[in-house]
Image (spheres, rainbow, N blue to C red):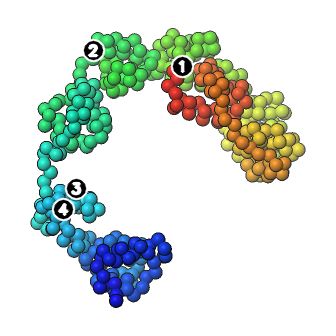
Amino acid sequence: MGLAHFTISELQNCMFNRANHMKKKWNSEFDAFLKENINKLSKDKIAITLGVKPDAIDRARVRLGLPAFPKWASEDDRILAENAEIKTISELASMLQRSKSQIDIRLDWLGKTAKAVSSEKQSYLSENQKEIIKKNRLRLSFKQIKKLLGISTSHLKGALNTLNIELKHKSPFSVDEVSYIAQNYANRGARHCAEHIGRTKKSVEAKALSLKIKMGNKKIWTIEDDRFLVENIQMLGCEQVALELGRTLAAVKFRRAFLKPTRERRVFSKAEIDFIIDNYSSFGCVWISNELNTSVDKVVGKANRLGLKPVSRILLSMDIEFIRDNYQKYGATWVAERISCTIQNVLEIANEFELTFKRTRWTKDEDKFLLDNYQNLTLREISEKLNRPYKSTVTRRTRLFKKTTYNP
């Protein structure tokens, strides 16, 4: 008995039971089923029924010389015609796995009309949702309330019209709100003020503009400001410096990172730069730092800015010794960057001496030291004091500030 004599449901049950046990191979029975149903079923439904991929259906159709699949199969049209009066467009779209616009156009072509959605159902809200709207209508915007309730724009508009509730987006600022903005906007910024008084950031910025309050992070840094920051950052900390200069805390931190007041600056001469370029690939940053009497990190940073790349090379005895001393603590990437070789070179030596790299967990004392000192010390200085890689310190700082509500 051929496949053409089975019903679709029987074929689907049969094929799905065998789908997980063997890979389908096209045969003559599949050809007969395709010829009989090409104008009745869609390509995806035939593929599901036979348990094959849609690409296999296309190849068989071309091989058999069959016409292309119609955009709407007769079976889909039949389902639409039978269910148009009892189901809404959304329900029909879900049933046929098509968009609402496609269903609407096809129903119009068939001369059918889907079941209308009642206005009460379209704008229905629970008592809890109504209370949320009434409580926040003067504080939150339309988009914020929509996101809070988890409903569509049209649903919320219909509900507001039904309940006769008006959202007042531009409710006047109270005296306390204006006072808080005047005192904190310049040195803390719009986002902080908005979160504190329960307003949007844009509304706070507009109010500050009307009050003629300038944002601290918009002012140009003068020589006097830089001198004050460098001289007082260690003693006062970032927050107090921000208050003294009338700037945001973020602006002071960015400026401190730019000026690096606690770090010794190392300016390389042209001869030293040429020396780094000539010897980087052959000897590495450790050897160069010893020759130039400077730190390895400064040489690594300068090499990166010059665009120098590590290369595979024969390692010297001092390079091997450096790997043995530092691989287990810092890993292959950190070591390779400092001796100017590839990671594979480092791993070969590590395997030869049976060295293993294991990441050590951050302790509570290290986390506390990082949070307490990130204002007054650079992350590179903190990494040196904690004997940690710089990138590890940066990553840990980011994770800590996501986990905790620590405020400097």
Q: Mark 1–mark 2 contact, CB under 8 Å?
A: no
Chain-order first, disc 3 or disc 2: 3
Query: Rounded to the nearest whole Å, what is the CA distance between mark 2 and mark 4?
Result: 52 Å
Q: Would you name the residue on which mark 3 appears? A: 90
Dot 3 amino acid type: Ser
Question: Residue 306 location in percent, x, y?
Answer: 68, 39
Q: Which mark is residue 408?
A: 1
Q: State the residue in front, 119 or 379.
A: 119
Query: Rounded to the nearest whole Å, what is the CA distance between mark 1 and mark 2?
Result: 29 Å
Q: Please indicate whether residue 18 sits to the left or right of residue 369 in the image.
A: left
Secondary-structure class at tag 1: loop
Chain-order first, disc 2 or disc 4: 4
Q: Is residue 9 above or below residue 321?
A: below
Dot 4 amino acid type: Ile
Task: Specify whether residue 40 is in view.
Answer: yes
Q: Would you name the residue on which mark 4 appears? A: 105
Residue at 69% over, 22% down: 263
- Using a 10 Å C-alpha cutoff, classify the residue at mark 3 as few (fewer than 14 neighbours), some (14 to 19) or many (20 or more): some
Q: State the residue in front, 101 or 164.
A: 164
Spot the residue most to the bottom. Answer: 1
Spot the residue most to the right. Answer: 317
Quadrant containing the N terminus is bottom left
